[in-house]
Image (tube, rainbow, N blue to C red):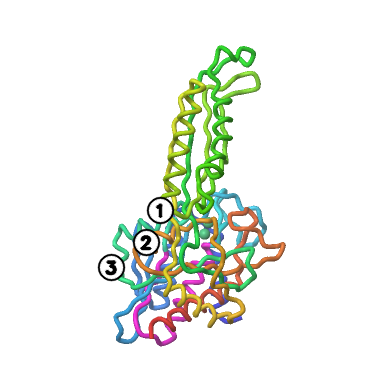
Amino acid sequence: MTKLDKDMRSWRHDIHKHPELGFDEKRTADKVASILKDLGVETHENIGTTGVVGVIGKGSSNRAIGLRADMDALPIQEMGEVDYKSVHDGVFHGCGHDGHTSMLLGAAAKLKEIDFNGTVYLVFQPSEENGLGALAMMEDGLLERFPMEAIYGLHNMPGIKQGQFSVKSGQMMTSEDIFVIDIVGKGGHASMPHMTRDPMVAGAEIVTALQSIVSRSLGPEEWGVVSVTEFITDGARNIIPSNVTIKGDVRALDPTVQKKIEQRMREIVDGVSKSHKVAGTVGYNHEFIVLDNSESETTAAIEAAKMTVGEAMVDGTCETCACSEDFAQFLKQVPGCFILLGAGDGDNSPPLHNPYYDYNDELLEIGSDYWVNLVKSQLI
Ligand SMILES: [Zn+2]
Ligand SMILES: [Zn+2]
């Protein structure tokens, strides 16, 4: 194992042990900045709250690209037993952002040692999980202060063979909206339902009717997912509730479909509520936009991946993933490509956001080499 691989592992374990939630990545950002400075990298801090940008320029070209990592952890209790286990109860690096951060720091060390022609901006963003960090950095002038012709991102992915890269040009990840439906009725004694206006029965009908949005309101060519995930009442064994709250999640690939789903949801809640004489309201929030990889940057990413792990380990036409990524916000402003790096497909490979998940350290060398190959092939 190289000294740098050892360093990347120790940085990763330290970040893992001290996880911080979105916009609170103070210790993590300090650590990133201090490692960059130790490597002799020009470092800019506090961009979009806790964001950090490292700048490495070589040669005479004024071309520039951005490489992005995310730094935030999740509000989950870690259940696995590693000796660098989270010291913060209920906060945990369950998505591998500790690994992405260390990997990009490793790439910084490697880029300092090689020749290329242009500028690399190493973008360490806060608050990916709640979809706010990319916008926060851009609102704080990221793209004006560090003008880049393209931006690239990478995420580890359990369930894909270790070291295999998966990517596709165009729409690779979906939008995500969340909804909260509040139904207010009139609660009362379970033995006298005729004296109440039961929000439970109305709510159950709404849950069933929401299933018809995808099956009956979208055309066969229109892609969408509507999932109800919570049903909360203030009732009890012998009390008909006064209030019901229904929560859930919507995925789509087309803003027109997204609007159609929201509109049908409002109509259903309105109609069913009226028929039950309860008051129903819908709160509907757009959380993540569709992630759309641009064509020539995806070709560049595929080439860099092949240079890193060989042609057989690169899938350049992967399936669209019904997951969402804040990186999509960067791609709305700058061309670029987001790629997945397989973390292993064995039985011992818990999915992202699972309390037993732990980032696969074998990916640190592969991912940092991918970054270097991308820079070498793009900034020539
Ligand atoms: Zn995540
Ligand atoms: Zn993630």
Q: What stretch is highlighted in magenta?
A: 97-124
* For residue 61, above or below residue 320: below
Residue situated in front as seen by the camera: 335 or 49? 335
Label 1 vs 2, first from the N-terminus: 1
**Residue marked by disc 3:** 145
Quarter of the rendering occupied by the C terminus: bottom left
**Residue marked by disc 2:** 332
- Where in the figure is residue 49, as x and y percent of width and height? 36, 56
Q: Which amino acid lies under the numbered mark 2 shown in the image of this protein?
A: Lys
Q: Which mark is residue 287?
A: none
* Residue 117 located within the stretch drawn in magenta: yes
Q: Which amino acid lies under the numbered mark 3 shown in the image of this protein?
A: Arg
Residue situated in front as seen by the camera: 101 or 318? 318
| For residue 155, side relative to residue 377 (left or right) | right
Residues at badges 1 and 3 in contact (C-beta under 8 Å)?
A: no
Tell me the distance, in whole angstroms, between the alpha carbons under discs 1 and 3: 19 Å
Q: Does the residue labelled 2 lie within 8 Å of ligand 2?
A: no
Q: Nearer the viewer, mark 1 or mark 2?
A: 2
Element type where label 2 sits in the image: helix
Determine crowd level at label 3: few under 14, some 14-19, many 20+ residues with C-alpha closer than 10 A. Answer: few
Tell me the distance, in whole angstroms, between the alpha carbons under discs 2 and 3: 18 Å
Element type where label 1 sits in the image: loop
- Where in the figure is residue 151, as x and y percent of width and height? 40, 70
